[in-house]
């Protein structure tokens, strides 16, 4: 047997995926992290056409210029970020963008401040790059919103970066503008990088999304098409940063990926330039489901924050066997602890499932888990 590299010694495969593999296929899945909607027709048509037109060759490493120009317009319109096509890299999902950030900027002895709980890949990417994680608690009393004063306490001379994710996976929390701005100021004062994962920015109710890159030059902004346009399997995302950071990031992308899929890039171009009514419909539907799941969980006395974004709720559930009991009864959920120690006594439930299924799932929990 050949020994694997020590940099992956401590990396574990995702517990969430493992759990899906062992559970009953007829169970209602509230564990999933992707929209249950299909890719809008105009996007599918654009991709089909690009294949028929033999538009299937390599693109520039950073992506098609037309697509990068549209991404520049999107950043200006939605995020108030001034950038240009040279400072955009089209990636294989936000996942690749995240990996690029870690590989390009994090090394041994670097500290990376990480919200606890947070998306599983952050920890793995930091570990693979050799960095040290400095967790900062997202407290239920603050509706799981990351607060600038809590971040400030964690800053040291070794702080290299912080990862922000608003709206958040797994809590659905949307950060306040003043915290985003204060952390952006800290990044300038203490010279560290903000890796801002904004993949859920459009899945947001009532609140407005703010990008730290509007307030600081030390920011790499990550985004993608997986959530907003239900394009998870098409693996397409993007990032922007200043010119110096972009050139460093390109080294990882160029020698690892060359370029994102041409077909998916064509779909992404159509997603940005075509009608947005499917997105609006999807968000409206997510809001209805959020209202339902929060109401039902609270009625079962599981304290649940009325999450303002993404498609997750993170109720407080202290029964350690809840996830197993729910799975046996036919509802798949994810233990909060999978997302960090602060997720203990919580369960992540995704409402990227139909209204009817969420209703059924809540009935099952009520009858067979709470009162069972
Ligand atoms: N960031 C977060 C917070 C996510 O939840 C996910 C997907 N689960 C990703 C990034 C990765 O998305 P993509 O499909 O664009 O790689």
Image (cartoon, grey):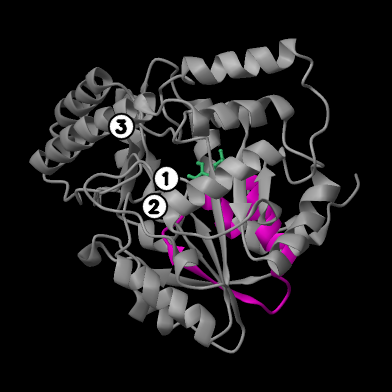
Residue 90 x %, y %: 67, 44
Q: Residue at x 35, y 43 (%)?
A: 310
Give the structural element (helix, strand or loop) at label 3: helix
What range of the chain is rendered magenta?
95-123
Residue denoted by label 1: 200
Q: Are marks 1 and 2 in contact (CB under 8 Å)?
A: yes
Residue denoted by label 3: 326
Residue 10 x %, y %: 68, 58
| On screen, residue 126 above or below 161 | above
- Circle 1 packing at 10 Å, graded few (<14), some (14-19), many (20+), is many
Give the structural element (helix, strand or loop) at label 2: loop
**Would you say 370 lies left or right of 102 here?**
left
Choose top left, top right, bottom left or bottom right for residue 313: top left
In-front residue for pair 286/43: 43
Residue 369 seen anywhere in this rendered image of the structure: no
Mark nearer the N terminus (1 vs 3): 1
Q: Is residue 353 magenta?
A: no
Mark nearer the N terminus (2 vs 3): 2
Q: Residue at x 49, y 21 (%)?
A: 39
Mark nearer the N terminus (1 vs 2): 2
Residue 76 x %, y %: 48, 53
Label 3 lies in ligand 1 vicinity (Cβ under 8 Å): no
In-front residue for pair 49/38: 49
Q: Which mark is residue 168?
A: 2
Residue farthest along the top direction in this orientation: 52
Label 2 lies in ligand 1 vicinity (Cβ under 8 Å): yes
In-front residue for pair 150/80: 80
Residue 154 x %, y %: 46, 82
């Amino acid at each position: 047997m050949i020994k694997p590299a020590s940099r992956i010694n401590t990396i574990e495969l995702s517990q969430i995926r493992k759990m899906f593999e062992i559970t009953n296929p007829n169970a209602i899945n509230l564990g999933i992290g992707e929209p249950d909607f299909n890719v809008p027709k105009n996007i599918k048509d654009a991709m089909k056409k690009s294949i028929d037109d033999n538009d299937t060759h390599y693109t520039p490493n950073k992506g098609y210029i037309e697509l990068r120009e549209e991404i520049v317009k999107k950043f200006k319109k939605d995020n108030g970020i001034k950038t240009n096509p040279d400072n955009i890299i089209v990636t294989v999902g936000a996942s690749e963008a995240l990996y690029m950030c870690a590989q390009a900027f994090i090394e041994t002895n670097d500290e990376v401040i990480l919200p606890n709980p947070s998306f599983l890949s952050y920890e793995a990417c930091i570990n693979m790059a050799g960095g040290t994680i400095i967790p900062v608690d997202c407290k239920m009393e603050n509706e799981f919103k990351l607060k600038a004063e809590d971040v400030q306490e964690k800053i040291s001379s070794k702080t290299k970066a912080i990862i922000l994710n608003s709206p958040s996976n797994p809590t659905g929390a949307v950060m306040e503008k003043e915290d985003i701005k204060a952390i952006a100021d800290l990044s300038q004062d203490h010279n560290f990088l903000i890796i801002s994962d904004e993949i859920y920015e459009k899945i947001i109710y009532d609140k407005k999304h703010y990008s730290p890159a509007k307030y600081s030059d030390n920011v790499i902004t990550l985004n993608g098409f997986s959530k907003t346009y239900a394009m998870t399997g098409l693996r397409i995302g993007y990032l922007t940063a200043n010119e110096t950071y972009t050139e460093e990031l390109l080294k990882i992308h160029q020698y690892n990926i060359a370029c994102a899929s041409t077909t998916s890039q064509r779909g992404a171009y159509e997603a940005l330039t075509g009608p947005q009514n499917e997105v609006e419909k999807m968000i409206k539907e997510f809001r209805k489901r959020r209202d339902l799941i929060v109401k039902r969980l609270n009625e079962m006395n599981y304290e649940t924050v009325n999450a303002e974004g993404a498609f997750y709720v993170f109720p407080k559930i202290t029964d350690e066997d809840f996830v197993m009991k729910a799975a046996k009864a036919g509802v798949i959920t994810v233990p909060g602890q999978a997302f960090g120690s602060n997720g203990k006594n919580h369960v992540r439930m995704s409402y990227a499932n139909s209204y009817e299924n969420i209703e059924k799932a809540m009935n099952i929990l009520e009858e067979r888990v709470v009162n069972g």
